[in-house]
Image (cartoon, rainbow, N blue to C red):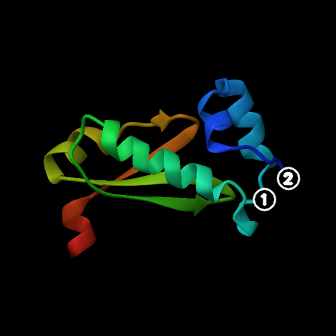
Amino acid sequence: MSSISVDEWMNSSDEERIRIHKSWNISQGEGKEIVSTVANLFSKECVYNISEVGILNHEGEWFIDACVVADDYDSLKDRKNFEFLGFKIKFSSMENQSA
């Protein structure tokens, strides 16, 4: 287990973030506070129109789940390897969420 503060995460290098993220036991919730904080920051700083932001545990890795309006989703849906402060971003469409 790696104990790190949000401030330390923000000031870590990409390589340090990768190492720390891999050391977390995601199923036990390790790193959840950090990814939640980063997700909220992403929603404020992102140039796309995000209606909701959350976090996902996907195959033992934390992801940021960003729900965007349809116009933005059309330009984002095929983008791969989109990251913010060490976390991969999964974009979904606001229209698909309400269906």
Q: Viewed as shown, does residue 76 lie left or right of 49?
A: right
Q: Name the residue under label 2.
A: 1
Closer to us: 38 or 92: 38
Q: Can residue 81 be seen in this view?
A: no
Q: Position of residue 70 (x, y in %)?
A: 16, 52
Q: Name the N-terminal-most of marks 2 and 1.
A: 2
Depth check, mark 2 against mark 1: the one in front is 2
Mark number displayed over residue 95: none
At 77% from the left and 52% from the top, the residue drawn is: 24
Q: Distance between the residues labelled 2 and 1?
A: 7 Å
Outermost residue toward the bottom in this view: 99
Q: Would you call the spot at circle 2 few (<14 residues within 10 Å), some (14-19), or many (20 or more)?
A: few
The amino acid type found where label 1 is placed reads Asn
- Location of the C terminus by quadrant is bottom left
Outermost residue toward the left in this view: 71
Closer to us: 2 or 55: 2
Look at the numbered discs 2 and 1 and tell me whether their residues touch, using CB distance below 8 Å: yes
At 18% from the left and 64% from the top, the residue drawn is: 95
Q: Can residue 95 be seen in this view?
A: yes
At 75% from the left and 68% from the top, the residue drawn is: 28
Q: Position of residue 56 (x, y in %)?
A: 53, 61
Instruction: Give SS at disc 2.
Output: loop
Q: Position of residue 37 (x, y in %)?
A: 51, 50
Q: Where is residue 80 in the image (x, y as percent from the top left)?
A: 44, 37
Instruction: Give SS at disc 1.
Output: loop
Q: Would you call the spot at circle 1 few (<14 residues within 10 Å), some (14-19), or many (20 or more)?
A: some
Q: Mark 1 points at which residue?
A: 25
At 67% from the left and 27% from the top, the residue drawn is: 12
The amino acid type found where label 2 is placed reads Met
